[in-house]
Amino acid sequence: MSLIDYRVAAGSDAALIRSLMRRAFAEYQNSAAPSSAMQETEASIQTAMSEGEQALIASEGDGPVGMIRYLLKEDHLYFFRLSVTPEEQGKGIAKKILQELESVALENGKHEIRCRVRQSVGRNLHLYQSVGYCVYGQEIVHKPSGINIDVVKMSKTL
């Protein structure tokens, strides 16, 4: 594996962010409660970025292999939509993106990182726990379709 380069995304990267996210989340498209990531558009991502959302894009060799979106909150960094392209999954890239995100958090004076994870996606829970995240709560997300999704809230103190 070669060196991974990271950069903070610009609003003009919305199409790339959407593409990386859709490729990574495609496996959930036919589940009973597909991820809302699949409904996001380039315009909705640009709008979110203009309102303070940020993203970190990871590239290796010839191009982008993953990304993570995040918000700098008052007392923590909150991330979501961690995405690694299907062909690069299982190579430790997600862990490296999370490690880089820790640097971003600290550079911005944040000493805690939080996320929410579907309880039914055990591999994601395991990923976050393997790099030091702990469960601090649970909630139920009520989808417009009437489906309820059990979500675990996780955090890591830096």
Image (cartoon, rainbow, N blue to C red):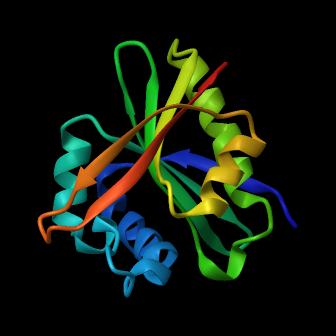
Q: Is residue 24 left or right of residue 53?
A: right
- Nearest the viewer among 21 and 13 is 21
| Along the viewing direction, whichever of 126 and 54 lies nearer the viewer | 126
Judge left or right: residue 127 versus residue 10: right
Give residue 18's position: percent from left, percent from top. 36, 69
Which quarter of the image is occupied by the C terminus?
A: top right
Quadrant of the rendered image containing residue 42: bottom left
The residue under the point 75% across, 40% down is: 131
Q: Residue at x 46, y 27 (%)?
A: 77
Q: Position of residue 111 (x, y in %)?
A: 58, 15
Q: In this image, 70 relative to 143: left or right?
A: right
Q: Please say if 130 is above or below 14.
A: above
Residue drawn at point x = 31 percent, y = 40 percent: 53
Q: Furthest residue to the right?
A: 1
**In the foreground, 31 or 60:** 31
- Residue lying furthest left: 144
Answer above or below: position of 140 versus 85.
above
Q: Position of residue 19 (x, y in %)?
A: 41, 75
Q: Is residue 137 left or right of residue 7?
A: left
The residue under the point 65% across, 43% down is 98
Q: Is residue 59 above or below residue 77?
A: below
Q: Quadrant of the N terminus?
A: bottom right
Please give the count of numbered marks on the rendered protein.
0
Quadrant of residue 29 within the rendered picture: bottom left
In this view, the residue in front, 35 or 6, is: 35
In the displayed orientation, state which residue is furthest to the bottom. Answer: 30
